[in-house]
Image (cartoon, rainbow, N blue to C red):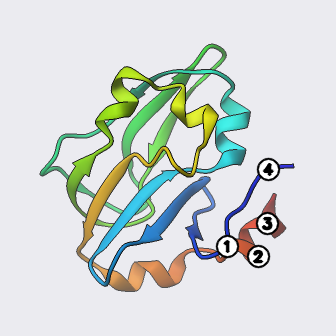
Amino acid sequence: MSKVLKGLLYSNDHEWVKKLNDEEVLVGITDFAAKELGSVVFVDLPEVGDAVEANTEFGAVESVKAASDLVSPVSGEVLEINEDLVGEPEQVNEDAFAAWMIKVKLSNKEELENLLSAEEYEAIL
């Protein structure tokens, strides 16, 4: 069974969101998504300063068996990307919750209300 962490928010597209404060969040893919992909060999992330929009693609993850778009669960500006993943994409498989992908300054905090709690996400798995 896939690991689901309490205290995070989740999207139907298998991304997680961790609130850092009222304006900033980290975004990554869930343990379920990492296991479905298999061994991750490449992560394509946006540039710092890029705008992301909820429910739209912001990058991609490639594994030995599949490629998958990354779909942003929130809208805002990319403040930081996880540079470690560029050189070591396998970190996603080692711990999907530690291997965050982007830090976003939210432009619409209300979008967080559309995301799933850990319990709601577990129910769809």
Q: Quadrant of residue 15?
A: bottom right
Residue holding disc 1: 6
Q: Is residue 44 visible?
A: no
Kind of element beneath mark 4? loop
Residue at horizontal 72 percent and vertical 61 percent from the top: 4
Type of the residue with mark 1: Lys
In this rendering, the answer to whether 84 lies above or below 65 is: below
Kind of element beneath mark 2? helix
Which one is in front in this view, the residue at disc 3 or the one at disc 4? 4
Kind of element beneath mark 1? loop
Residue at horizontal 39 percent and vertical 53 percent from the top: 56
Q: Are marks 3 and 4 in contact (CB under 8 Å)?
A: no
Residue at horizontal 26 percent and vertical 78 percent from the top: 23
Type of the residue with mark 4: Ser
Q: Position of residue 66 (x, y in %)?
A: 62, 21
Which one is in front in this view, the residue at disc 2 or the one at disc 1? 1
Dot 2, crowdedness within 10 Å: few (<14), some or many (≥20)? Answer: some
Q: CA distance from mark 2 to mark 1?
A: 8 Å
* Residue most extreme to the left: 49
- Mark number for residue 122? 3
Residue holding disc 4: 2
Residue at horizontal 65 percent and vertical 77 percent from the top: 117
Q: Is residue 111 visible?
A: yes
- The disc, 2 or 4, on the residue closer to the chain's N-terminal end is 4
Dot 1, crowdedness within 10 Å: few (<14), some or many (≥20)? Answer: few
Type of the residue with mark 2: Glu
Considering depth in this image, is 103 or 111 the residue closer to the camera?
A: 103
Is residue 50 toward the left or the right of residue 104 in the image?
left
- Mark number for residue 119? 2
